[in-house]
Image: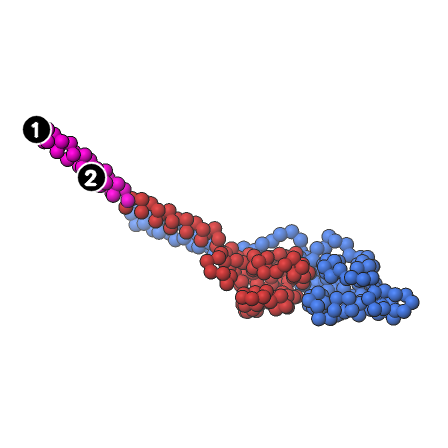
């Protein structure tokens, strides 16, 4: 008789434990889904807030003194010069010389967002690239060549 | 209103709305701030980059001489002094500088030979220095 009661007690305990485990297991898919959704949401949000926003040309000033093709190839040249070892100051300054305001806007837009040689780092626009690559004296010289825009 | 008219009205309204949205989304806008002078000063009109700053060639030439005279040249200050001097205004600085006696490392009234601004900058900055190359990029006709 006593044995039977003990058996029943153990049985009830085991069953309630099983129920708890089942309840826990049933929550897991919900948690996984929630985190996946949150992750996708965060990824989309960061992609949106870090997107490249093109600048607009100003029609009050003289039209750009370079073409879209020139802007694109200048952007590529500047990017190649800055990427990797060294900052390619001579190439960058030679390519910035003589640009007027609207030409600078064209170059900025042609450069867009470009990734650095460090993997997984954020993509940067041309101004962020300059700040990343050049020291104060070099930046002062670049600002001397192309003043009042960066 | 018949059913046909309702349908036509609905489609017509929808199409007009769609065209309006596409126009607003794709129309080109410009960034028109105040002022008509190109802020870079590189537009070939002789703008200073900031037309509210009055330009005084004598003052610039005098400051340049002070920066280059004597031992040690202040390269960054020379760049800063010429920051607001446009390509169109640079010849005025060259004229205002004129010729000053240069001897070894700076000005010397006794032993120096009169030299122009280009010679002074070449001697003080060094022709191959990045500072001189930078100046030459901005004033290619004068250096």
Give the residue drawn at x 52%, y 58%.
A124
Q: How is the image coloured?
A: by chain
Q: Is residue A71 left or right of residue A8?
A: right
Q: Colour of chain B?
A: blue
Q: Using the image, name the chain to which the residue with label 1 belongs.
A: A
Residue that numbered label 1 is attached to: A1
Main SS category, magenta section: helix
Q: Residue furthest right?
A: B110
Mark sitting on residue B14 = none
Q: Is residue A20 left or right of residue A132?
A: left
Nearer to the camera, A65 or A77:
A77
**Separation of marks 1 and 2 at Cα, in angstroms:** 26 Å
Give the residue drawn at x 80%, y 58%.
B63
Range shown magenta: A1-28
Residue that numbered label 2 is attached to: A18
Label 2 packing within 10 angstroms: few (<14), some (14-19), many (20+): few
Q: Position of residue B4 (x, y in %)?
A: 30, 50
Q: Secondary structure at mark 2?
A: helix
Q: Position of residue A122 (x, y in %)?
A: 49, 56
Image quadrant where one finds the N terminus of chain B: top left
Nearer to the camera, A55 or B94:
B94
Whether residue A2 is in magenta: the answer is: yes
Give the residue drawn at x 85%, y 68%.
B102
Counting residues from the N terminus, which is met first, the one under dot 1 or under dot 2?
A: 1
Image quarter of residue B50: bottom right
Q: Residue furthest top?
A: A2
Chain depicted in red: A
Give the residue drawn at x 49%, y 61%.
A118
Q: Is residue B22 left or right of residue A14?
A: right
């Amino acid at each position: 008789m006593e044995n039977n009661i003990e058996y029943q007690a153990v049985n009830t305990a085991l069953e309630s434990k099983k129920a708890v485990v089942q309840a826990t297991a049933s929550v897991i898919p919900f948690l996984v889904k929630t985190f996946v959704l949150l992750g996708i949401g965060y990824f989309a949000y960061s992609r949106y807030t870090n997107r490249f926003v093109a600048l607009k040309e100003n029609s009050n000033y003289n039209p750009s003194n370079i073409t879209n093709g020139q802007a694109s190839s200048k952007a590529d040249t500047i990017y190649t010069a800055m990427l990797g070892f060294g900052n390619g100051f001579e190439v960058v300054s030679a390519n910035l010389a003589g640009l007027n305001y609207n030409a600078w806007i064209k170059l900025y837009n042609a450069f867009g967002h470009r990734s650095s040689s460090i993997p997984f780092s954020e993509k940067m626009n041309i101004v962020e690239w300059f700040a990343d690559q050049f020291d104060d004296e070099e930046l002062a010289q670049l600002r001397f060549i192309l003043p009042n825009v960066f | 209103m018949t059913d046909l008219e309702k349908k036509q009205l609905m489609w017509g309204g929808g199409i007009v709305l769609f065209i309006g949205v596409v126009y607003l989304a794709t129309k080109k806008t410009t960034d028109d701030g105040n002022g008509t002078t190109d802020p870079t000063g590189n537009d070939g009109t002789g703008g200073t980059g900031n037309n509210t700053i009055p330009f005084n060639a004598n003052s610039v030439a005098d400051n340049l001489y002070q920066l280059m005279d004597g031992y040690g040249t202040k390269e960054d200050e020379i760049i800063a002094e010429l920051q607001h001097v446009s390509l169109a205004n640079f010849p005025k600085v060259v004229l205002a500088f004129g010729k000053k006696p240069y001897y070894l490392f700076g000005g010397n009234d006794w032993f120096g030979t009169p030299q122009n601004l280009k010679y002074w900058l070449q001697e003080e900055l060094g022709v191959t220095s990045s500072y001189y190359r930078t100046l030459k990029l901005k004033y290619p006709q004068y250096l």
